[in-house]
Image (cartoon, grey):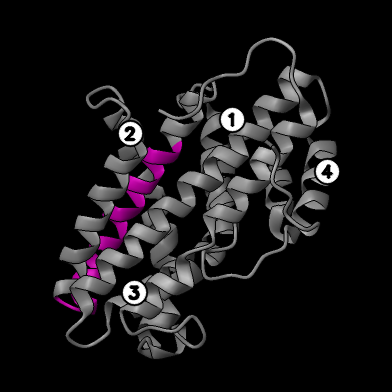
Amino acid sequence: MDDVVMVGPVDVDAELDRLAARYRKAGGIGVQMLSAVGGRAEGLLDKLPTGIRDRLGDATSYALTLAMRGAQKSRGAVKDQQPWVNTAVATAMGAAGGFGGLPSALVELPATTAVLMRAIQGVAAQHGFNPDEESVQFDCIRVFAAAGPLSNDDGGDLAFFTLRLTLTGGAMQKLIATVAPKLAVALGHKLAAQAVPVLGALAGASANYVYTRYYQEIAHVHFGMRRLAIDADIPHEQLVTKLQQKMKAPSVKRA
């Protein structure tokens, strides 16, 4: 694994620079990868049949619910994997889902979401958080509230880091209902790419490769911010504001 829990004195500015770089890296290849298999970022959702577009939100909410349950149960049987393993598994699943076009892609959607959820839980553990805790499970769902890799984002979307819901009965379903519409747009792009005639398997593999890399990177930013707030004893909201400022500023490489 490429990240560990931070110990000792923390250089907050340097850590925020590192997290900003990860955030930029997360969405840097989405359009290029999907364009390579015949898709375009603009208008991909319009290529889906109307019936599927109308049901995408409900399907995404259902997939998130199944993913959380399945990923949580699997932790006792299967250890967390290296990021490249998660990416390889999801890529293979995307190829299989895209091979049969939209019908098989829709069947593959919950399974891919579960792989993504499990990968996010693994990142949480790397940063010293327990994925069995309900608050951490909330954070794992909140990672999906980030803009998808096809979005051009200058850091304004980082407000998803501060999403708050009280941990009471039914709160997880409320959170899923809040997050699902945004994730539905991302998954809608994926399904549309898998529907490309002839190239469905390649499109599915490429889309899953992009999305798995993206959400793993976003998870590192999300839980890295949580860890930094604890280690540096700085309010999380203050760190989010600083990260937004860095995201909007020109990228500067450190020596």
How many angstroms separate mark 4 from mark 2 (CA)? Answer: 30 Å
Tag in front: 2 or 1: 2
Residue 43, position as x, y percentages in the image: 49, 88
Camera-nearest residue between 76 and 250: 250
Q: Which residue is mark 1?
A: 135
Q: Amino acid at mark 1?
A: Ser
Residue 130, position as x, y percentages in the image: 49, 21
- SS under mark 3: helix
Magenta residue span: 100-120
How many angstroms separate mark 1 from mark 4 (CA)? Answer: 24 Å
Observer able to see residue 170: no
Mark sitting on residue 191: 3
Question: Which picture quadrant has residue 46?
Answer: bottom left
In the image: residue 12, left or right of residue 60: right
Q: Which residue is mark 2?
A: 82
Which one is earlier in the sequence, the residue at label 4 or at label 2? Answer: 2
Question: Which picture quadrant has residue 36?
Answer: bottom left
